[in-house]
Image (cartoon, rainbow, N blue to C red):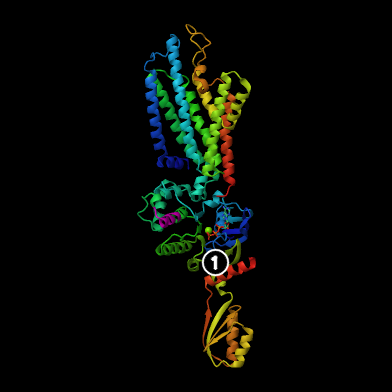
Amino acid sequence: MAIIEARSLTKVYGRQVACREICLSVEEGQVFGLLGPNGAGKSTLVKMLVGLVYPTAGEARVAGYPPGDIRGRRQVGFLPENFRLHGWMKGAELLTFHARLASLDGRAARQRAAGVLDLVGLTGEGQKLVANYSKGMQQRLGLAAALVGDPRVVFLDEPTSALDPLGRRQVREILLALKEAGKTVFLNSHLLSEVEQVCDRVAIINRGTVVASGRLAELQDGPATVTIRLGGLTEELAAELRRRYPSLQLEGDRLTLALGDREEIATLVARLVAGGCRIYEVVPGRNSLEDIFVHLVREGEQACG
Amino acid sequence: MALFTFREAWRKKVALIAGVLTLAFLILYGTGLHFITRDMVNTVNPAANATSYYAMMQAITLFVMGIYLASFLVAGLAILAAVGSVAGEIENGTLYTLAVRPLTRRDLLLGKFLGLAAMLVIYAALFFLALAGLVYWQTGLIIPGLVPALGLFILEPLVLLAVTMLGTTRLSTLGNGVLAFALYAIAVVGGMMEQIGAMMESTTATIYTGVITSLLLPADAVYRRLVATVVDLMPAGNGQDLPRFVNPQMTLGPFGSQSTPSDLMLFYTVAYIVVLLALAVYSFKRRDI
Ligand SMILES: Nc1ncnc2c1ncn2[C@@H]1O[C@H](COP(=O)(O)OP(=O)(O)OP(=O)(O)O)[C@@H](O)[C@H]1O
Ligand SMILES: [Mg+2]
């Protein structure tokens, strides 16, 4: 059974629909990326999954329990988006407190707190008051707090928004380490490169609706372009191709055209060879996540607009 | 969770500031007490003679005045301590990380309540004992009914704490503060009117005002009961050179307790705290964070 499962989750704030019938499932051990433009409903969805916000309709299960169930919460860590930590505590003390809330006892809690402090790169800062931490340090501390209970599932809402490039890299390494350890990570982000580098699966959400989801590789495979360097293309064949592929462009010996899907590359090449062309190079244009993202979001706007 | 809240109040210097202010108040009160009682006969044995009977009455009056003012401070602290404990923490984003811990919302809220209640109980008890101590030091009077009075004095901030905790689960910090202080003011004024009404023996209307405001927020009622506990232990007249009809309550005027809240009211107060807390838990459970 999937470790995170959302069935038709809907959240309506007044007249604003933040999430509309969202269905998702994430298998244990995956790093799942949720992408979407600002105001798409990402944070709302995560808050519903951790039991902070009650859905208007639909239901969810995390680690086998409905969100908010104490037994489920023991296995869940959450880094919220706009959060602050209690400034009157010292970093290490705060983490120890969180570890105790996560049902570790005194000594184990202190050790675990020191451990996660090292993990997020705050070694030696534990004795400072949290109020005196910089924004990035607070975010690191928040991540440490999310991980302090050694959760099976971690929800991270834009964990790197305040971090320097080094910090982002560290977070990426932490995510990969979590994955290595068999944990499930649910990552909210609009930093596409970040998602591209760590996620196995992604979903893209726009205006509260999931517009695409799947393995990253599958998404990137959709409609694609291909560039072929070739010689001996006859006028006749070129005209025939132009009829089939309206987007065809010919520059010197380079032929670029858009295809419905990747399988068509093979058919195309076969046709060209049969037509007497010599093929030197075939370069499939990789869809970057950004292309997909922009494409889907635009499409959504047209549909609504 | 309770310990955490208690430590939070401690570290944020709530205790320190309250302590310093209270100390200032006590010094002021003590000085006043000293000068007022300087010329008083230092024997407060009511059975002895008329002078010492009046001396005792005066000492008690001064004590009750002190308690009256102290209850304002304690009530203010109760409201301020709890006013943003949920809404404020949501506004500044500190509640998120706590609210996802394996801890029910009920435990979270009750933990906060207990932490603040512990602080208030300690504060109120120290305050009360300091006042009683000052009175003893200056006049030699041991406040009659000290222990039940102490209990009642501690109960009052708990009533306000419960109201404020309920408010903070739904209202913004500012809104809740305004509401809590307004309710408190209404209760105090209502109580005052009830006493004046009772004094002028114009029974019904004004007394009912008092009863109704007390039902709304039984803080003032607790204070009145406290006064009654202390004052009614004093004999009416001493039976020798003072006629029995001298009623010590009369000297207290609107600060006294002519119309004393019943045991039922006391029971109501405790039930009030419990019910409001239950409502607060219910309301907190249902809200989005
Ligand atoms: N408490 C709330 N009350 C009313 N509307 C809300 C509330 N929270 C969110 N919304 C609305 O729900 C929609 C989705 O918000 P959400 O915070 O989930 O977006 P997001 O995808 O996280 O955006 P971002 O990338 O900026 O973080 C927005 O239109 C927002 O205005
Ligand atoms: Mg968000």
Identity of the residue drawn at 51% across and 33% down: B158
Horizontal arrangement in the rendering, residue A303 relative to residue B141 (left or right):
right
Chain of the residue on which disc 1 is drawn:
A
Identity of the residue drawn at 47% across and 23% down: B64
Q: Amino acid at mark 1?
A: Arg
Q: Secondary structure at mark 1?
A: strand
Q: Is residue A206 magenta?
A: no
The overriding secondary structure of the stretch rendered in magenta is helix
Q: Position of residue A128 (x, y in %)?
A: 36, 50
Q: Which residue is mark 1?
A: A201
Kindly give the residue lying farthest to the left in the view shown. A124
Highlighted magenta segment, given as a residue range: A133-142
Q: Position of residue B47 (x, y in %)?
A: 45, 10
- Find residue A267 and report its image quarter: bottom right
Q: Residues within 10 Å of mark 1 (few under 14, many from 20)?
A: many
The answer to whether any part of residue B140 appears in the image is: yes
Q: Position of residue B56 (x, y in %)?
A: 44, 15
Q: How many marks?
A: 1
Q: Is residue A188 above or below residue B163?
A: below
Label 1 CB sits under 8 Å from any ligand 1 atom:
no
Q: Is residue A79 above or below residue B37?
A: below
Kindly give the residue lying farthest to the top in the view shown. B240
Horizontal arrangement in the rendering, residue B179 relative to residue B70 (left or right):
right
Q: Position of residue A265 (x, y in %)?
A: 58, 82
- Residue toward you, B127 or B37: B37
The answer to whether any part of residue B260 appears in the image is: no
Q: Is residue A151 above or below residue B246?
A: below
Q: Is residue B37 above or below residue A222?
A: above
- Find residue A36 and report its image quarter: bottom right
